[in-house]
Image (cartoon, grey):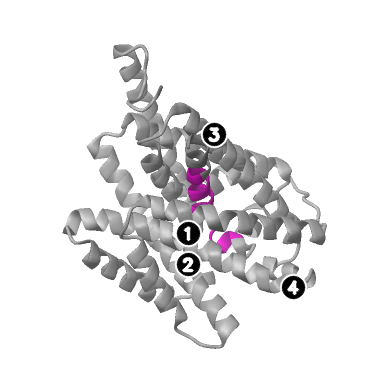
Amino acid sequence: MKIVKSFRSSALFVGSVVGAGFATGREVLLFFGADGVGSLLVASLFMSICAFAFMEIGARRALSPRVALVTDGVVSLSSLAVYAAMIAAAEEVLAGWSGQGGLSLFLAVGVGLLSMGRSDRLAWLNLLAVPFMVAVILYVGARAAGRVEGDFHLLTPLAYGGMNLLFSGALMVGEGEESTLGERILASLVSGGVIFVMLLFMRYSVTEGGDMPFLSAAEKVGVWTLARLALLLAILTTMASCAYLVIGRLSSATGDPLLAASLVTLLGVLLSSFGFAPIVNATYPIVSYLGLAATLFALGYSLFRGCVFWQKFPLGKSHSDP
């Protein structure tokens, strides 16, 4: 069904955006701690437009091999950094929950095996996980009854979107390959709406600082366990998305998916030893601006290619459009 496919693509996009940095509240404070609702709206709108544009790139196959090679390199390195951060976050959460260390290794191995498959597995995983995460964030934000005050900064929401679109956009290119125009429009609209609601209610919740301000707010309103589960799901979905991208590109080079999965898992676990907060503080700002630059370059180049394509073929229809 077209609607199911659109919602599945939207869930894949949102789930790749909502990682541990978001689910702990740390990421929202880092980017939007001094911003008002306007910045949240622009970030959501920007990501919605780019989700549609990346799906269009996939539908029209607009990227040349050279451009794809450059963007693949940036996507792979950035996805690896986020992947390592998710493993570190999982270690903190699981160790705090069970009192046992090293459990993130089993999760990383399982994610590596899952990420060797097709992207539809990730999409269905996100379709199950995202609604639960949204419900928990809405509940905590409504009960916390915080206020969103601050100035509007245009660069902040664009940088935030760029950070997430680096690997989320790559996933959307694949989703767009076998989609209709209507499916792409619906998926992008749903994605932007869900992201805005989550950003807004997360901002309501994280009025105080700390490494995991959202969990502190959830504990105050009596849903600490549910918030921990939502955090673990957020870690899992983003970890799987990033691992899928890195393993897929390394598999193309080595010709051995199992070897690629093993190498990526090992490297991710080693990098995660630096800890979640240091990785986020050191890499996320860099990833955000690299992502913004790569996104704008890819979209601009693809728009140019699209205009040339439309000049030759006025109808400008992709192979899957009605």
Disc number placed over residue 30 in the picture, else none: none
Q: CA distance from mark 2 to mark 4?
A: 22 Å
Disc number placed over residue 238 in the picture, else none: 1
Per the image, the residue denoted by label 2 is 86
Quadrant location of residue 204?
bottom right
- Quick one: label 2 or label 3, which is nearer the N terminus? 2
Helix, strand or loop for disc 4 = helix
- For the view shown, which residue lies furthest in the bottom direction? 99
* Left/right of residue 150 with respect to residue 105 in the rendered view: right
- Quick one: label 1 or label 3, which is nearer the N terminus? 3
Per the image, the residue denoted by label 3 is 186
Residue at 55% x, 68% y: name it. Answer: 232
**Residue 199 appears in the figure:** yes
Quadrant location of residue 287?
bottom left
Between residues 26 and 61, which one lies in front from this camera angle? 61
Q: Amino acid at mark 1?
A: Thr
Please check the rendered image and state whether residue 11 is part of the magenta-colored stretch, yes or no.
Answer: yes
Residue 80 in the image: state x and y as whole percent: 37, 61
| Marks 4 and 3 in Cβ contact (< 8 Å) | no
Q: CA distance from mark 1 to mark 2?
A: 7 Å
Residue 143 in the image: state x and y as whole percent: 81, 60
Helix, strand or loop for disc 2 = helix
